[in-house]
């Protein structure tokens, strides 16, 4: 299994302030990792660092072969094409259909072939069980359906890693279970690594993975947690 994300003695910053000091974690193909902790402990800043939205404060970090300490601005779009990001609030464009949302995302990552785009949109909608919703506007969908569309968008460029920032935070428990089962299926069947930020500890028991807890400017593995039999290198 190849390492997709590696942090070694890394400092995670928010502006000029260190929010996580000395982070050590490596995620391999097929890994499923939770990052948990209270609000303001640096969980989302880790995600922002991975996508090169926040600079690396210190130490070493590589993501999909890119060195975050030295990555050039022109290379950041190429890094992001290898990642899929899912947000708590979906971040769908409200003035266009599901199909047009996905087409917009493809065009933003330099897809040009119209037939190829239509084929890929059909594939990702089928993958998340939303193939009949392409013509719908976001406001016509439930919260769970909107999150499935957001996951479909994250899958467009066949990412090696899905970064999910509180993907079930705005959903009821039954709908959240559907989203978690979808992520687990993508993880199991496609080998897509999942790095998920959450505050919901109930998920750990139902959907086991490696768990890191952010607290007091640290983010460390919860050694008491029962890990799933997934290949992750720490």
Image (cartoon, helix red, strand yellow):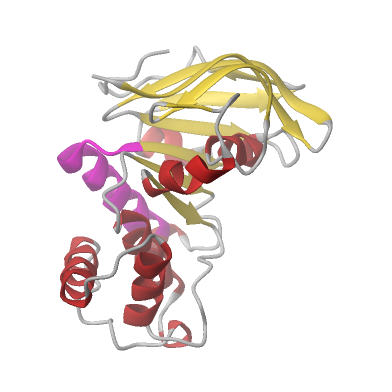
Asked which quadrant contains residue 72, the reply is top right
Residue drawn 35% across and 87% down? 136
Count of marks, rendered view: 0
Residue drawn 32% across and 62% down? 152
Majority secondary structure in the magenta region: helix
Query: For the C terminus, which image quadrant?
Result: top left
- Residue 32 lies, in percent from the top left, at 36, 32
- Residue 13 lies, in percent from the top left, at 74, 31
Residue interval drawn in magenta: 176-193
- Residue 144 lies, in percent from the top left, at 40, 68
Question: Foreground residue, 156 or 197?
Answer: 156
Query: For the N terminus, which image quadrant?
Result: top left
Q: In the rendered image of this protein, does residue 140 appear above or below residue 184?
A: below
- Residue 93 lies, in percent from the top left, at 51, 77
Q: In the rendered image of this protein, does residue 3 appear above or below residue 205?
A: above
Residue drawn 49% across and 14% down? 224
Q: Is residue 20 magenta?
A: no
Q: Is 7 on the left or on the right of 28, as rendered?
A: right
Q: Is 129 on the left or on the right of 228, as rendered?
A: left
Q: Is residue 189 magenta?
A: yes
Asked which quadrant contains residue 101, the reply is bottom left
Q: In the rendered image of this protein, does residue 63 appear above or below residue 149?
A: above
Question: Foreground residue, 164 or 173?
Answer: 164
Q: In the rendered image of this protein, does residue 158 appear above or below residue 128?
A: above
């Amino acid at each position: 299994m190849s390492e997709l994300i590696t942090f070694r003695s890394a400092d995670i910053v928010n502006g000029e302030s260190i929010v996580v000091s000395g982070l050590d974690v490596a995620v391999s193909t097929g890994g499923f990792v939770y990052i948990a902790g209270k609000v303001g402990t640096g969980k989302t800043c880790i995600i922002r660092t991975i996508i090169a939205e926040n600079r690396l404060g210190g130490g070493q970090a590589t993501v999909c072969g890119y060195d975050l300490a030295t990555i050039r601005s022109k290379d950041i779009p190429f890094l992001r094409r290898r990642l899929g990001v899912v947000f708590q609030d979906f971040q769908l464009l409200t003035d266009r259909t599901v199909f047009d949302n996905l087409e917009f995302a493809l065009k933003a990552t330099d897809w040009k072939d119209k037939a190829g785009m239509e084929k890929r949109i059909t594939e990702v909608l089928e993958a998340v069980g939303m193939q009949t919703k392409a013509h719908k506007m976001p406001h016509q969908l439930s919260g769970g359906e909107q999150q499935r569309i957001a996951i479909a968008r994250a899958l467009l460029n066949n990412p090696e890693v899905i970064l999910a920032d509180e993907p079930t935070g705005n959903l009821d428990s039954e709908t959240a279970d559907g989203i978690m089962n979808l992520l687990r299926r993508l993880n199991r069947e496609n080998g897509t690594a999942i790095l998920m930020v959450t505050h919901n500890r109930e998920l750990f028991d139902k959907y086991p993975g490696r768990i890191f807890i952010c607290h007091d400017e640290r983010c460390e593995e919860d050694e008491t947690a029962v890990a799933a039999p997934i290949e992750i290198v720490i």
